């Protein structure tokens, strides 16, 4: 059975939210967990959860959705691996990994490398998680650079977007490999034959954009690897749902991802502001809540549970630094799905 | 008095929406207009507006805001300049400008070059408008490349974002000049002393991002041109309103702009979908309309009226290809403000 290693100390809300999300996933998905971090702290958290349960908390407009969930941790398959060090968010990742060999993220990755777990989930420093995975697990054969892949909602079904920030600058060859990795993931996890691949660009025609996208366009257009290339895709079309995998270099992808987060947050905050403006607004706001709830559920990044680091030997899921217990729970699900569908083995086969 | 030349034939809704927006602006802002395009068609449009007035139409949820506006075109200062050709959206801009010397966009720019108008507003092919302005007006002294600057809403006041697509690839020197042009515009039009300038990046620290942003960071940090540089800014912070001018290269800026458009449109469509789902939802939707109206008004790109092409000798406003009459009206206002505040003269002075 798949076991998931989790860096219990990583993220703004660790260890509390991380341990809660992990046991919640253990209960809901029936998946064994390996919590990596300071043993006494983790044990305290588990005892607290046993006593108090988990609070599924949503902020602002969605407070009415809050609920308490009871969990009997004694019935779950939870292993603790002690790690005495923690890499903080503000440390330079490369040095921190070298210096803190006994840190929770390094040991969580090691658990996968040594086979006690099958995947790692991390919500701490993205750089440290990437570095640990790259260093501790190594690249898949033939893959030049791993990419961060995120799944985002559209008006129809979700699409996969990579690279969301692993590599600021990329070559056309790297983007081509991202297309292969994204297609393989999408096909296997979302069970879609011939998922459609697009290049994020500033126009639809083949000659548009900078040198990088012009070159990868040519490579994808002539590909014999079975990539279902549908051409360039512009930012405003991303959310139409007509493309399943969108590739771009990490600088552009990271900017794009954070702008999506920023603009939708602003819009939701504006809605909240308006529904707070006076008593009448508050009444209408109350009536509108169930509808806002459904919308929120459709676009909430927590539902997607975190980004995948595709291209390393071992499933690595990187969660948002501000992950709640609910986001961590979903990150564990994403890790479990990637392991069970053997995405990495299938990517590696292409390069054999 | 400032006169604004308008390419009456450019844009998806031309000539109707463009002529309507122009006369609406002429009435509301008391600004003389020069309509450039096929004379008989423009005259027909003006006659129709005289008979029927202008319909201020908003789609979907906001239908209840629709209204008819009466306009007496005979009382307005409207000049028509005949242009027998039109550059279509799908033509290659550089060739089209050379071939169609009597096209509406080329002649609208010429009106500014020859002094019969003080600014040009164009909603057709962005490439053709840029090319015509660059070719017909020339660059401001010292400016390497013009940039497309857009104004976007935040939780607080709007910020200016450039380059939104004039130059796919940029040098650090170009981004530095964008910072100067953006600051000069913001200071003069929005009457803000020392507007804050940020570099769009994938992290806050000085060493983050690709070579381009690392280098422009250094240049801005050491600047002696009075630029109020506040450092790197991430995508999710754009909408906090803590930065007045954000610079980036055109590829990134264009992707970003279209993603903002795409993600907010998706969210508004989801709201619409939910408020249509059943009778109860429709009732709540009706009650929520006034609140949605205020939100929509705060984020509607039409309010900002179009992008500026900063760096050419002459005010050039490029409107969205899908511009409504209302968007065109606001584009005329933006052009008028830029002329009246002498932004171009002030930019040129820096390079004297």
Image (cartoon, coloured by chain):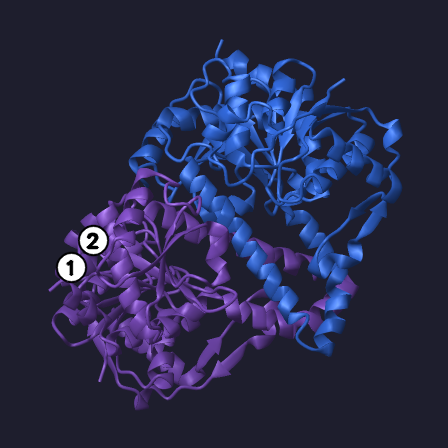
Chain colours: A purple, B blue
State which chain disc 1 sits on: A
Residue B251, above or below B82: below
Question: Which quarter of the figure is the C terminus of chain A placed in?
Answer: bottom left
Q: Residues within 10 Å of mark 2 (few under 14, many from 20)?
A: some
Q: Which residue is mark 2?
A: A145
Q: Closer to the camera, B159 or B319?
A: B319
Q: Identify the residue at horizontal 55%, vertical 30% (top origin).
A: B129
Which residue has dot 1 on it? Answer: A139
Q: Position of residue B51 (x, y in %)?
A: 88, 41
Question: In the rendered picture of this protein, how many numbered marks are placed on residues?
Answer: 2
**Which x, y percent locates residue B85?**
61, 30
Residue at the limit of the structure toward the top, as seen here: B352
| Residue A71 horizontal side relative to residue B122, left or right | left
Check if mark 1 and mark 2 are on a common chain: yes
Residue A300 at x, y percent in the picture = 49, 66
| Contact? badges 1 and 2 (CB < 8 Å) | yes
Instruction: Name the chain under label 2.
Output: A
Q: Quadrant of residue B211?
A: top left
Along the viewing direction, whichever of A142 and A95 lies nearer the viewer: A142
Q: Residues within 10 Å of mark 1 (few under 14, many from 20)?
A: some
Residue at 29% across / 77% down in the picture? A43
Secondary structure of the residue carrying numbered label 1:
loop
């Amino acid at each position: 059975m798949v076991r998931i290693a989790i860096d219990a100390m990583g993220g703004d809300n660790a260890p509390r939210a991380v341990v809660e999300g992990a046991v919640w996933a253990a209960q809901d998905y029936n998946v064994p967990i390996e919590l990596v971090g300071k043993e006494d702290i983790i044990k305290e958290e588990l005892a607290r959860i046993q006593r108090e349960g988990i609070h599924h908390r949503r902020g602002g407009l969605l407070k009415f959705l809050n609920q308490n969930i009871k969990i009997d941790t004694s019935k779950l398959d939870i292993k603790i691996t002690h790690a005495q060090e923690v890499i903080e968010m503000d440390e330079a990742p490369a040095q921190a990994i070298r210096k803190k060999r006994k840190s929770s993220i390094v040991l969580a990755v090691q658990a996968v490398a040594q086979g006690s777990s099958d995947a790692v989930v991390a919500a701490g420093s993205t750089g440290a998680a990437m570095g640990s995975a790259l260093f501790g697990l190594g690249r898949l054969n033939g893959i030049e650079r791993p990419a961060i892949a995120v799944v985002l909602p559209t008006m129809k079904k979700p699409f996969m977007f990579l690279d969301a920030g692993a590599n600021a600058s990329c070559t056309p060859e790297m983007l081509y490999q991202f297309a292969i990795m994204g297609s393989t993931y999408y096909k296997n996890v979302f069970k879609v034959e011939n998922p459609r691949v697009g290049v994020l660009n500033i126009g639809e025609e083949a000659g548009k954009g900078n040198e990088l996208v012009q070159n990868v366009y040519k490579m994808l257009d002539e590909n014999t690897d079975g990539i279902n290339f549908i051409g360039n895709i512009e930012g405003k079309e991303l959310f139409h749902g007509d493309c399943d995998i969108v590739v771009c270099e990490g600088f552009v992808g990271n900017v794009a991802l954070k702008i999506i987060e920023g603009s939708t947050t602003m819009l939701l905050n504006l809605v909240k502001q308006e529904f707070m403006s006076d008593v009448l607004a508050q009444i209408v706001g109350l009536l509108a809540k169930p509808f806002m709830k459904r919308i929120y559920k459709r676009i909430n990044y927590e539902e997607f549970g975190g980004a995948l680091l595709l291209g390393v030997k071992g499933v690595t899921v990187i969660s948002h630094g501000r992950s709640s217990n609910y986001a961590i729970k979903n990150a564990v699900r994403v890790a479990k799905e990637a392991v069970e569908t053997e995405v990495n083995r299938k990517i590696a086969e292409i390069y054999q």
